[in-house]
Image (cartoon, coloured by chain):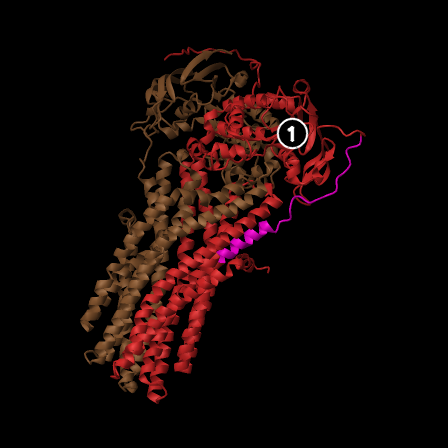
Chain colours: A brown, B red
């Protein structure tokens, strides 16, 4: 893992600005450290030499440096945190745009939301604390070395020789510890996860009367975990040991060396004090970097995960691009699958293969098939979530010609569709906003009419604020059946407001209680009236609503009649 | 003992000696670093007065020794405190678990993230010792020593240093933690809004794209992001204050010490050598309090974790010993299960989850309990498994009151599958032997065969939550485990299966249910389900709605009688078997081809 991901610098301007500010602050901080050491050495040496009366200016300058350091620390920390917020926002926006442009449904939303919020928060420590410390770790030791070398070259040599040993030894220990951890990883993982596993399985353990017996096991496993962890830590802590040892031993060496040279009169007190004060300062930023290494790695990992998502191909091949010269579809188009096939990227087996099917205006077709038969893929093609990878999908254009659906603008096409999925998604917004989805300007009366036709009125009336009631995350406030009725209202609004000629239904009553199922079924029947309908379902239970029944199996369509 | 932090410390008390050793080592490490500079200052200041070399030899040896001490002591501190913390973790985990096992607050732990949080709250005890308590205690020891040395040299200097250290080590961290709380809340709120908008956009993507609402949804995400960024940028200054204040205190203490020291030298009350020592002490001393702001923040987090943890641990048990109630009126105690007037609710003022339920399961009878979600089906299972006491009513098995018996005694006679049966991250064999620790491989293979699983699976690792198995295999394995429980009692063991087929697709569901019913042939069985397919082989169906029995009878009777069951069956598979009125079916030219 690199300390600074070049992609981070390349992709967000906020990081570049932040780095510039940080380096400037680093220079100022270094200058103040040197100045303070020089002033303190001068004051103490002066007082020792009996010139205490002439030191008022020097002491006052120490006070001024203190104020300046505090102001700089505050300013740098604040600026760094502000930069961190900007960097996170930049990455988040890119992430969201990218995922939305690719295949949002295929992304694990929960994981992405965690990455975009908590995950990226790990960048706070990285951007606001680790990077500035990294800059200081480069600047301060160099500056100290230069000053110490000029004051006393032997001390300079001691520092110059020990300082580079620190990263070398830390890397050596780090590699050894990592190899050891990797060897033990499975054991640690397993022992570490045991407690969670047992607590989650408590009801199961209770049923089999093993709950009490397991307590002793928890203690045993946790003890085993402790032993394994301590074995790893004994090595891992060596790196900190080496760091502390080298840093303090070097300071001790310098102290003794300048003490002896002072004794033999080869050095003056002020220089000796300056060297003594500066020597630990050379090691301090390196130690701080070491201490923040772990926290910063979380930030680097979060950034890497973001870049891993960003570097996935931007668009799924086959998902609808806007055509160069879009064709207007007819107001009541017929739709024809001609030997249509669909193979998802990265799969060998086609999801749909050689489908021939005509959807005639004003008729309803039931597509029945077991799960995995390609029903969802058929709907995906009609909704243009995917484009055929074989054969064609043809629709009637406004001028009566039959044109490829790919030549129609996807958004224009989708405006002609009212879709009721098996598990519709309701958003954390009010009922009215959920029904208005995609039609934010629809008047209230239209929304109420749609709700009435969907038999969703009693559901809405039972809510505390009626149409203004927020539905909570994923519409959690409602049961599955109630959600389906709200989604049905959504489809009705689209049918009425846009005169959408096509209705797509995906097993709309699966998993519903009978009361809701009956209401949804009645609504669906009304929704289909006079429209081109497609119902996909597991079996032929919906054939009563269909003019035609086809069976889909392994991508093939077999004809049947009602 | 009401403060959760104190209660967490009390949990760690058994490891006090190790922990004290760790604190001492930590103090020694910090002290070695500070003392090194102090001794070096003395060494140099004394050398400047040109004493004989022998006067310096002790200081020279001390410097080198201190150089080594610091590294060694720090290493020791880390090892010892981590060891103590991990030992404490073992104690705490065992205690938390025993408490959970005793109270069995099963219904509180439905949501998976609750369990995860409880476990991470338990694990926070480690942080309390290593990062929360060790730094301040070590700082207290070292700080006291440093202040004592300074005071011995120059009283005002010592007092100034004490004030600086207390302010920098206590006031600033506490104030910074307090000042960070409001920004933390604002950030959490902003993060939650962003997270909701994001999850909505991603999960709802098909709906959004189909309805042309994706751009609006992305705008909403952007707005939430902008708000979060605005809050974070505004609060940055508040969070930067702590770092600034620490630097200011260190700088001003140094300045004050220099001012006092130089004045004392001028007045002749302080010699030059102690001045150097005093000033370098003030310069080095703030290293002692440097880790404390981090420790304060950590303690705040540990305290919150402790509050949540004790909230769970303090919950009264859901089972209390009670006297047996007499068998239901009707004279002769009957064999099998008899439930009379069962009422359960999850708290005073809550609606009744079960409201006067009667249920009979004679030996060998197979009863399905069906009903919409939230109708109380799983509460019935919880009472039968003895996860909780009923609030009223009786449950008798073979004539004896099971609600008066210890839970584990009842569970030898009532077993089965709780909702979402858990598979442990181990082998198939280990998972099976939970139910019957003495079972041999031959018995295990036989039961795998009965539920339609490959008998060669025994050594297969199932992964966390059985993730390496398919949904159908997980369920079959859980069923096999329930079937393994050795039969006891006069009438065999009653099997209770709570929602066995949720989370399965329709085809798997049907196949598994077939095998399940075949494998349990002849056993007393309560099958709790909301899936009405394939119930024709049950002897009786009980429809539970809003905690009351709405209908009961054989599947055939209920199919023919108007009511919940018949409309539910029709709503599911087989609905609308008659063609729609008024329109004739047209067949378009569809052909099958390959």
Neighbours of disc 1 within 10 Å: few (<14), some (14-19), many (20+): many
Tell me, yes or no, whether the highlighted magenta stretch contains residue A234. Answer: no
Q: Secondary structure at mark 1?
A: strand
| Residue A83 point in image, percent of width and height | 34, 55
Q: Nearer the viewer, residue B409 or A470?
A: B409
Instruction: Kindly identify the residue that appears in the image at 78 percent across and 36 percent down.
Output: B326
- Residue of label 1: B494
| Residue A202 point in image, percent of width and height | 56, 40
Residue at the right extreme, as displayed? B331
Q: Is residue B575 left or right of residue B321?
A: left
Q: Nearer the viewer, residue A25 or A462?
A: A25
Q: Is residue A139 left or right of residue B323?
A: left
Count of numbered circles on the image: 1
Image position of B174 with respect to B226: above or below: below
Is residue A205 something one can see in this rendering? yes
Image position of A66 with respect to A322: above or below: below
| Residue B92 point in image, percent of width and height | 53, 52
Residue at the bottom extreme, as displayed? B268
Q: Nearer the viewer, residue B566 or A238?
A: A238
Tell me where residue A268 sits by quadrant.
bottom left
The N terminus of chain B sits in image quarter: bottom right
Tell me, yes or no, whether the highlighted magenta stretch contains residue B325. Answer: yes
Q: Chain of mark 1?
A: B
Tell me where residue A29 sits by quadrant.
bottom left
Is residue A496 something one can see in this rendering? no
State the extent of the magenta-drawn residues as a range.
B300-329
Q: Is residue B171 left or right of residue B385?
A: left
Image position of A36 with respect to A423: above or below: below
The C terminus of chain B sits in image quarter: top left
| Residue B390 point in image, percent of width and height | 69, 39
């Amino acid at each position: 893992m690199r300390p600074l991901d070049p992609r981070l610098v390349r992709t967000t301007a906020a990081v570049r600005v932040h780095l510039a500010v940080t380096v400037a602050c680093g220079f100022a901080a270094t200058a103040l450290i040197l100045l303070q050491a020089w002033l303190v050495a001068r004051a103490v040496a002066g007082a020792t030499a009996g010139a205490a009366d002439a030191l008022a200016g020097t002491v006052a300058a120490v006070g001024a440096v203190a104020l300046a350091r505090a102001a700089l620390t505050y300013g740098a920390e604040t600026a760094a945190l502000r930069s961190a917020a900007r960097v996170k926002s930049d990455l988040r926006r890119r992430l969201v745009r990218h995922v939305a442009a690719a295949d949002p449904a295929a992304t694990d939303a929960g994981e992405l939301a965690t990455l975009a919020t908590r995950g990226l928060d790990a960048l706070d420590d990285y951007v606001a604390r680790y990077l500035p410390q990294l800059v200081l770790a480069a600047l301060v030791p160099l500056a100290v070395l230069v000053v110490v070398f000029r004051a006393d070259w032997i001390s300079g040599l001691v520092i110059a020789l020990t300082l580079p040993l620190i990263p070398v030894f830390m890397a050596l220990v780090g590699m050894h510890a990592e190899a050891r951890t990797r060897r033990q990883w499975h054991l640690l993982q397993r022992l570490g996860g045991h407690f969670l596993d047992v607590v989650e399985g408590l009801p199961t353990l209770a049923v089999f009367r093993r709950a009490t017996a397991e307590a002793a096991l928890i203690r045993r496993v946790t003890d085993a975990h402790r032993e394994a962890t301590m074995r790893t830590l004994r090595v891992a802590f060596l790196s900190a040991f080496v760091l502390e040892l080298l840093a303090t031993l070097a300071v001790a060496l310098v102290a003794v060396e300048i003490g002896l040279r002072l004794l033999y009169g080869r050095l003056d007190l002020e220089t000796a004090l300056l060297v003594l004060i500066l020597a630990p300062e050379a090691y301090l930023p390196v130690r701080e970097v070491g201490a923040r290494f772990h926290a910063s790695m979380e930030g680097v990992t979060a950034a890497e995960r973001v870049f891993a998502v960003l570097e996935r191909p931007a668009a799924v091949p086959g998902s609808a691009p806007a055509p160069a010269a879009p064709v207007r579809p007819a107001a009541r188009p017929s739709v024809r699958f001609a030997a249509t096939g669909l193979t998802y990227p990265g799969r060998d087996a086609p999801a749909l293969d050689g489908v021939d099917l005509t959807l005639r205006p004003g008729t309803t077709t039931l597509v029945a098939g077991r799960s995995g038969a390609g029903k969802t893929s058929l709907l995906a093609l009609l909704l243009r979530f995917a484009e055929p990878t074989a054969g064609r999908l043809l629709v009637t254009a406004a001028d009566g010609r039959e044109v490829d659906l790919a030549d129609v603008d996807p958004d224009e096409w989708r405006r002609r569709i009212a879709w009721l999925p098996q598990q519709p998604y309701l958003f954390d917004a009010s009922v009215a906003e959920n029904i208005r989805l995609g039609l934010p300007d629809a008047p209230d009366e239209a929304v109420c009419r749609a709700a009435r036709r969907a038999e969703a009125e009693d559901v809405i009336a039972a809510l505390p604020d009626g149409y203004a009631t927020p539905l909570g995350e994923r519409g959690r406030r409602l049961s599955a059946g109630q959600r389906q009725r709200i989604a049905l209202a959504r489809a009705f609004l689209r049918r009425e407001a846009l005169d959408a000629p096509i209705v797509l239904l995906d097993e709309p009553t699966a998993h519903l209680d009978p009361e809701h199922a009956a209401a949804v079924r009645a609504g669906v029947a009304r929704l289909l009236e006079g429209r081109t309908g497609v119902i996909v379902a597991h079996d032929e239970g919906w054939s009563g609503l269909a003019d035609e029944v086809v069976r889909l199996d392994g991508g093939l369509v077999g004809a049947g009649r009602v | 003992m009401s403060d959760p932090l104190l209660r967490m410390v009390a949990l760690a008390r058994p490891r006090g000696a190790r922990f004290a050793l760790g604190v001492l080592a930590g103090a020694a490490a910090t002290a070695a670093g500070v003392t090194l500079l102090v001794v070096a200052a003395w060494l140099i200041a004394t050398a400047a007065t040109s004493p004989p070399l022998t006067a310096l030899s002790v200081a020279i040896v001390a410097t080198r020794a201190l150089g080594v001490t610091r590294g060694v002591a720090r290493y020791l501190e880390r090892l010892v405190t981590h060891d103590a913390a991990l030992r404490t973790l073992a104690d705490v985990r065992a205690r938390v678990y025993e408490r959970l096992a005793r109270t069995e607050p099963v219904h509180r732990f439905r949501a998976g993230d609750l369990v995860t949080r409880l476990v991470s709250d338990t694990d926070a005890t480690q942080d309390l010792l290593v990062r929360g308590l060790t730094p301040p205690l070590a700082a207290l020891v070292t700080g006291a020593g440093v202040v004592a040395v300074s005071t011995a040299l120059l009283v005002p200097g010592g007092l100034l240093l004490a004030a600086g250290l207390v302010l920098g080590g206590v006031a600033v961290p506490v104030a910074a933690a307090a000042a960070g709380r409001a920004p933390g809340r604002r950030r959490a709120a902003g993060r939650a809004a962003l997270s909701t908008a994001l999850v909505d956009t991603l999960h709802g993507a098909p709906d959004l794209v189909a309805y042309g609402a994706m751009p609006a949804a992305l705008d909403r995400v952007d707005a939430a992001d902008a708000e979060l960024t605005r809050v974070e940028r505004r609060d940055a200054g508040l969070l930067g204050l702590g770092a600034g204040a620490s630097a200011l205190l260190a700088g001003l203490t140094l300045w004050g010490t220099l001012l006092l020291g130089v004045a004392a030298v001028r007045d002749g009350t302080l010699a030059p050598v102690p001045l150097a020592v005093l000033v370098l002490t003030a310069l080095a001393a703030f290293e002692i309090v440097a880790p404390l702001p981090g420790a304060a923040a950590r303690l705040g987090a540990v305290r919150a974790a402790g509050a949540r943890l004790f909230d769970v641990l303090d919950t009264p048990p859901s089972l209390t010993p009670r006297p047996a109630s007499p068998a239901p009126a009707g004279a002769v105690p009957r064999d099998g299960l008899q439930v009379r007037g069962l009422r359960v609710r999850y708290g005073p003022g809550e609606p009744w989850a079960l409201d006067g339920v009667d249920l009979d399961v004679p030996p060998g009878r197979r009863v399905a309990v069906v009903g919409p979600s939230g109708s109380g089906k799983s509460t019935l299972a919880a009472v039968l498994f003895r996860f909780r006491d009923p609030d009223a009513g009786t449950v008798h098995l073979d004539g004896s009151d099971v609600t008066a018996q210890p839970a584990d005694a009842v569970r030898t006679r009532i077993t089965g599958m709780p909702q979402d049966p858990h598979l442990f991250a181990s082998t198939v064999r280990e998972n099976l032997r939970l139910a019957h620790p003495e079972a041999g491989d031959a018995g295990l293979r036989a039961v795998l065969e009965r539920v339609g699983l490959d008998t060669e699976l025994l050594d297969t690792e199932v992964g966390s939550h059985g993730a390496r198995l398919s949904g159908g295999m997980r369920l079959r394995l859980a069923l096999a485990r329930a079937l393994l429980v050795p039969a006891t009692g006069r009438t065999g063991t009653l099997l209770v299966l709570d929602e066995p087929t949720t989370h399965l697709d329709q085809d798997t569901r049907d196949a598994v249910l077939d095998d399940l019913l075949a494998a349990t042939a002849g056993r007393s069985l309560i099958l709790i389900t909301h899936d009405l397919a394939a119930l024709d082989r049950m002897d009786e169906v009980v429809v539970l709605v809003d905690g009351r029995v709405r209908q009961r009878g054989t599947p055939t009777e209920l199919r023919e009688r108007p009511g919940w069951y018949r409309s539910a069956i029709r709503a599911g598979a087989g609905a609308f078997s008659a063609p729609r009125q008024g329109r004739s079916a047209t067949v378009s030219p569809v052909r099958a081809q390959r």
